[in-house]
Structures are given as C-alpha cells and as structure tokens.
Image (cartoon, rainbow, N blue to C red):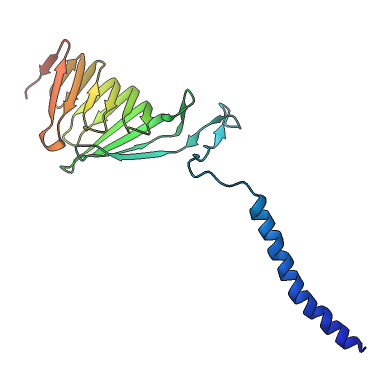
Amino acid sequence: MPQGATYSRIITFSKLVLPLAALVVLSLMFLFSGRPDPNQALPLATRSADGQLGQQGMTNPRFAMVTGSGDAVELIASSAEPSDGDANQILATNVTAEITRLTGGRDQITADQALWNSQSSDTRLTGNIVATSPEGYRLDTEELSIIAASGDIIAPAAVLITSDGIRLEAGQMAITGPSDHQVVHFQGGVRLLYEGK
C-alpha cells in the first residue's frame, strides 16, 4: 500500500476520533461535577484583623435602598462583615450615608459604624454621628436609626442640633412622615438657645 494512502487514512481517522474523544471527556466532566445550589449565597472574601485570611468581610461596600416614604439612601463604608456570624446583619465601619429626599434635598451623614439588616434594610448608625442638611443644620449624636419601611429617622440618644444662631439639645429625637411633610419630635430635657442678630 502506498505510504501516502496510509497517511491519509491516519489523518481521516484522527479527524473523527479526536473530536469524539474530546466530547466524551467534556461529558464526563459535567456528569461527575457537583451541581451548583442556586440558593446558596456567594461567600464573602475572607480577611483577618491584619488584612490576611480569616473572618469573612468586604472592602469598600455600598448599600442602597429606597424608604417607604420614597427617599433614596446610599451607604458607603471602608469595610463590612457579618455581625456575630449572622449573614443578615452586616456591620460596616467608617460609614458615609447620603439621603436624597423626594423634595430634592440631600442630607449627608458620617458615623463610625452602621449595622445594616439585609432583610428589612433598616440601618442603625453608631459612634460620632454628624448629619448635615442643605438648609444649614448640623446634628451630632451617638446613635441614629433609619427605618426603611416608613422612612422614619430615630435618635434614641442625646442630640445636639446647631445652625446659624440656633442651638438645640434634647434627650431623643424622631423624624417621621414623608420628606415633604416631615414632623420632628424632641423629648427628654429639650433646651433651645436662639441668638438673634
């Protein structure tokens, strides 16, 4: 048999057998691979206190929601991790929040920490909280909660509100209602000082 005919048969045989062998290998890979669980949450990146492998966490996370009153809330943090192993409670640090009201105004808030509930979207800010409004008001407190369902803002700890010529101190504060008809409630030793010009 001529050598060229043998070579042609080998090439023809290879063209048929090699693709079939590749299909068999791929089929076996998919057949014996683990089936993914769509209900299983993706794992968070892991880190420890020194930035190495360890506890689950995220860096530079962003959380966004729209409250029941229609205000948009966005939180930005330097890091976040599940609180006490509860994946529904996310503890974020070095937090900056922005509330965009239906009226168009934007309130800025900074805090040391925020505990965000991924199911209800309720957020509790704690530590060195400073909130400023476009109207020129500044709020200082140590704890502030944003209730997603209603849009209410609750400060259960002492608050200090300052503006041009105004100083208000109170033991507690609550802001309720839609942003275009909000009502502010003060309780607990309310003290108002006004310095007129």
- Residue 138 falls in image quadrant: top left
Seen as rendered, the residue at the extreme bottom is 2
Q: Nearer the viewer, residue 55 or 196?
A: 55
- Residue 20 falls in image quadrant: bottom right
Residue for point 26% across, 16% down: 157
Seen as rendered, the residue at the extreme top is 189
Q: Which of 130 and 24 is in front in this view?
A: 24
Q: Nearer the viewer, residue 121 or 138?
A: 121
Rendering coords of residue 9 (x, y %) = 83, 82
Rendering coords of residue 100 (x, y %) = 23, 40
Whether residue 13 sits left or right of residue 57 in the image: it is right
Whether residue 118 sits left or right of residue 177 in the image: it is right
Residue for point 18% across, 32% down: 136
Residue for point 91% across, 86% down: 3
Rendering coords of residue 180 (x, y %) = 12, 37
Seen as rendered, the residue at the extreme left is 197
The answer to whether 162 is drawn above or below residue 178 in the figure is: above
The answer to whether 179 is drawn above or below residue 167 in the figure is: below
Seen as rendered, the residue at the extreme right is 1
Residue for point 10% across, 34% down: 181
Rendering coords of residue 172 (x, y %) = 21, 16
Whether residue 22 sits left or right of residue 177 in the image: it is right
Whether residue 5 sits left or right of residue 118 in the image: it is right
Q: Nearer the viewer, residue 16 or 4?
A: 16
Quarter of the image with the C terminus is: top left
The answer to whether 134 is drawn above or below residue 27 in the figure is: above
Quarter of the image with the N terminus is: bottom right
- Residue 190 falls in image quadrant: top left
